[in-house]
Amino acid sequence: MEALAELRAVTDGVTYGELAALRRRLWADEDDAYRWFGQYLPAPERRNAIEAGFEERIRAALARQGALRRWAQELRAEIAPVLPLARLLDRQPALDYPVIAPNVSAWRVLARFGGVFQVDHGWAAVPDLPTAVATTRDAIAALGEALRAEAPAEVFARRGFSLTDEELVGWLAHCGYRVTEHELHQPRRTLHRAVERISPGRRTTRGPTATDLVAELLAQAGKPLHLDELLRRMDRSYSRGPLYNRLNADSRFVRVAPSTFALESWHIEPYAERGGSSTENAVRLIETEGRPLHLDEIRARLTRPITREGLRNALNATDRLVRVAPSTYDVRRSG
């Protein structure tokens, strides 16, 4: 392929030392990949110079009249505004061809240094992901502004989205909306917003968690609500104590009065309760001791009474602590 030959004319000159620096951006979507390269990275100023020089050479090659430039234009037209990376690679297998030995694919060079498209979380977008998300939200806003209710699939198709129903559901979830494939073809005025959890990986097939529902209720109310009021408004029955502990441990919420919660994003001054929460006191105890503490040891040293199960739920729910042994907790260390 002539376009790949033009790209290889630039990439073939990359040395092993330069590749160690370039991999930081080439593999930016895989946090755990090639971590061992960190020990070979040059000084920051040298690394930045290597990246800048390589990017300049790639963009110069793309700017020249030729097969590479035409291919880049073809790719942009095919992707815009967004396409799953897997489908793009299936339709354009040359993108997966290694252009830097041993395994740096062409798409990584074009996306990370050529600015042809952007890749993040398995999606390829033109010109970038934020623009594709903005286009998506504009399309959703158009649903509510139309003279009659329309099927979302039709609205997105008119705006250039060439996604299958399954892909569109996945893309909308990435943008913060929840919809089924069936609902895509039903006349609607809007789409439901999905509440972002602190730990998305823990979501189960049972739907929103209790804390998700609380976040949604607070967003709808637009003001702080007492725990009892939240429990009355929830569509399922929840135990008061465990929910109270989970809200205290979740960084999305802040307690602004006794048993009264607001969204942290509202930036309301927290309630300065004497002694702090059980979770805060547990963190303080562990930091003071400088070692992990067992659940029973923590509970015995708290000044306010709390059930064993209630304390366990609170400690398991917070992201400030990590369980290092059965019922034994330590402060989570950054990095």
Image (cartoon, rainbow, N blue to C red):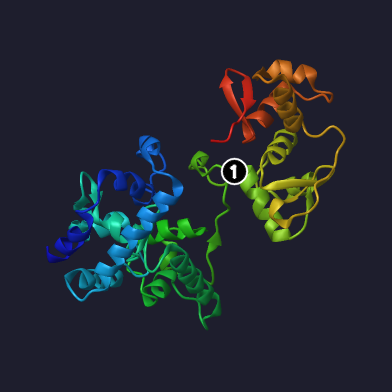
Task: Please determine whether, in this image, residue 125 is positioned above or below residue 246.
Answer: below
**Residue closest to the far bottom:** 147
125 and 48: which one is in front?
48
Question: Residue 226: x, y in percent?
Answer: 80, 48
> Label 1, on which residue?
209
Q: In this image, 145 relative to 331: left or right?
A: left
- The image quadrant where one finds the N terminus is bottom left
Residue 151 lies, with reference to residue 241, above or below; the image says below
Q: Is residue 166 left or right of residue 225?
A: left
- Residue 327 appears anywhere in the view: yes
In the image, residue 299 above or below residue 280: above
240 or 259: nearer the viewer: 259
**Residue 74's image quarter?**
bottom left
Q: Residue furthest right?
A: 274
Q: Position of residue 121 (x, y in %)?
A: 40, 52
Q: Position of residue 148 (x, y in %)?
A: 51, 81
Residue at the spot x=20%, y=76% of the render? 65
Q: Residue at x 43, y 63 (%)?
A: 129
Residue at left offset 33%, top offset 61%: 55
Most foreground residue, 294 or 63: 63
Residue 179 appears in the rendering: no
Q: Is 34 located above or below residue 63 in the figure?
A: above
Q: Secondary structure at mark 1?
A: loop
Percent across and percent down for residue 18 are 31, 48
Residue 287 appears in which quarter of the rendering?
top right
Q: Is residue 69 left or right of residue 314?
A: left
Q: Residue at x 84, y 32 (%)?
A: 275
Q: Residues within 10 Å of mark 1 (few under 14, many from 20)?
A: some
The number of numbered discs placed on residues in the rendered structure image is 1
Amino acid type at image mark 1 = Thr
In-image side of 188 versus 322 (left or right): left
